[in-house]
Amino acid sequence: MYNIKTLNKIDENGLKLLGERFTITEDDNADAVLLRSFKMHDMELPKALKAVGRAGAGVNNIPIDKCSEQGIVVFNTPGANANGVKELVIAGLFLASRDVTGAIDWAKTLKGEGDKVPKLVEEGKSKFTGPEIMGKTLGVIGLGAIGVLVANAAVALGMDVYGYDPFISVDSAWGLSSQVCKATSLEEIYAKADYITLHVPFIKETEGMIGEASIKNMKDGVKILNFSRAELVNDEEIKPALESGKIGRYITDFPNAKSIELPNTVCIPHLGASTPESEINCAIMAVNEIKDYLLLGNITNSVNYPDCIAGEFSSDSRITINHKNIPNMVSQITTVLASAGVNIADMMNKSKKDWAYTVLDVDTVIDEALAQKIEAIDGVVKVRVLR
C-alpha cells in the first residue's frame, strides 16, 4: 500500500484513478505528494518520500535540487493545461490590440446618464480604437505545448507567425503548422514582430529577458504578452518603454506589486490554467505519472531525473536505482548483484544532467540486505525493490 498526501486540492477525476493500492493520507511521512501551487521549499522532506507530482507545468514551488539529492523524482504535467492557457493568450492578443478593458471601465462611468448613453457612447468610443490582428506579425518565443497551440491559432486568425525555440522537441515540431516561419534568433523576433508572446520557463537564462537591452531592438509600439512567468520581464526596465509608447501594451497573467502600477498594462490574475478542463487534465496526468513510478518504476515527464520507460516486469523483481551521473556506477551495481549470484534479465540506464536512473529486472527476489549494499555505493541516493 502506498500513501499519497495532497498539499493542494487535487481534482477527484484524478484521485479516483489511484486504485486499491493507494490511500490518501494526512501523514507527513507519505510515499508521494500531489500538489499545485503549495510552496515546498520550507518543508522537511520525509524519508519515505519517493515522488512529487505537480499538477501543472511550473515547478518553481518545489526544491528540485533537494529532491534530486534524496532520490525523489519530481513530475510535472506539460501540455495538460495547454489549451486553457492558449485560449487566454488569444484573448490577450485582442486586449493588446484594442483597449477593451479601458472601454469597459469607461462605459461603467455612464451609469445614471439615462437616454444620453447611446449618444455619449458614439462620442466617446474613438478613444478606444485599435488595430486588427489579421495581417500583423506575431513572434512566439518558446514552442512547447502552449507555444505551438498559440502559433497555430494565430495562423488561423490570419497573422504572420514567427516561432523561435532552439530546443524544440520532435513532438512539438510535428504539431506545428507549416505556415509558422522559423526564426533563427531572438533578435529576428524582436525586429519583425508587432506582437511578442512568451512561452519559456523561468530559469537563470530567461530571467529579465524582456528588458532594456531587448526592448531597444523591438519595433515601435510592439505589444508584449507574458503568460509564462512574471520574472521573464524586468518591470523596472519595461516601464519607460510603456510610458514612451515604445511598447504599446503589456499583457501579463502574473501581476505583482510593480506590474499593477505600470501604464498601458493589463494584469490578469493568473487565469491561464484556471479552467475545470485544465484542472482535470493536470490531475489525471499527475496521478498516472505517480502510479506508474511507484508501481513499475517508470519515469515520464520528470524535471530532475531522466524519462525511463521499462514497461511491465519481465522477471520476479525489479530494482530501481536513483544515482549520480558519474562513471563506473552501472558496473559497481552489477558487481554487487553478481557477487550475490543474481542474474539480470533486463536492464535500462538513462541520465539527465547530474542525475541518472537504472532499472534492473532480476530473476531472484531481492532481500533488504542486498538492496542496502547497492545503496551503500558512493553516488547512489535511493534504491527500491518492486515485486
Image: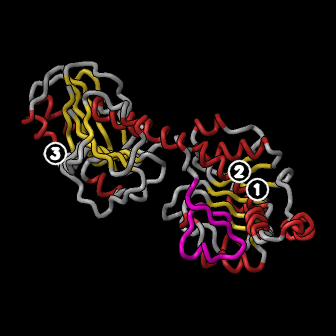
The amino acid marked with disc number 1 is: Phe
Image quadrant holding the N terminus, namely: top left
Residue occupied by mark 2: 90
Q: Which amino acid does label 2 sit on?
A: Ile
Q: In this view, does 277 lie to the left or right of 41?
A: right
Left-right relation of 354 to 334: right
Q: What is the three-letter code of the residue carrying label 3?
A: Ile
Horizontal and vertical percent position of residue 110: 80, 70
Q: Residue at x 29, y 64 (%)?
A: 42
Measure the alpha-carbon separation of dots 2 and 1: 7 Å
Seen at 67% across and 63% down, the residue is 251
Q: In which quarter of the image is residue 312?
A: top left
The residue at the point 25 percent across, 29 percent down is 21
Which region shows up in magenta?
A: 251-271
Q: In this view, does 270 lie above or below 329?
A: below
Which quadrant would residue 124 be assigned to in this image?
Answer: bottom right
Give the spatial CA distance, label 3 vs label 1: 58 Å
Residue 33, percent from left and from top = 31, 46
User: Which comes before the other along the chain, label 3 or label 2?
Assistant: 2
Circle 2 SS class = helix
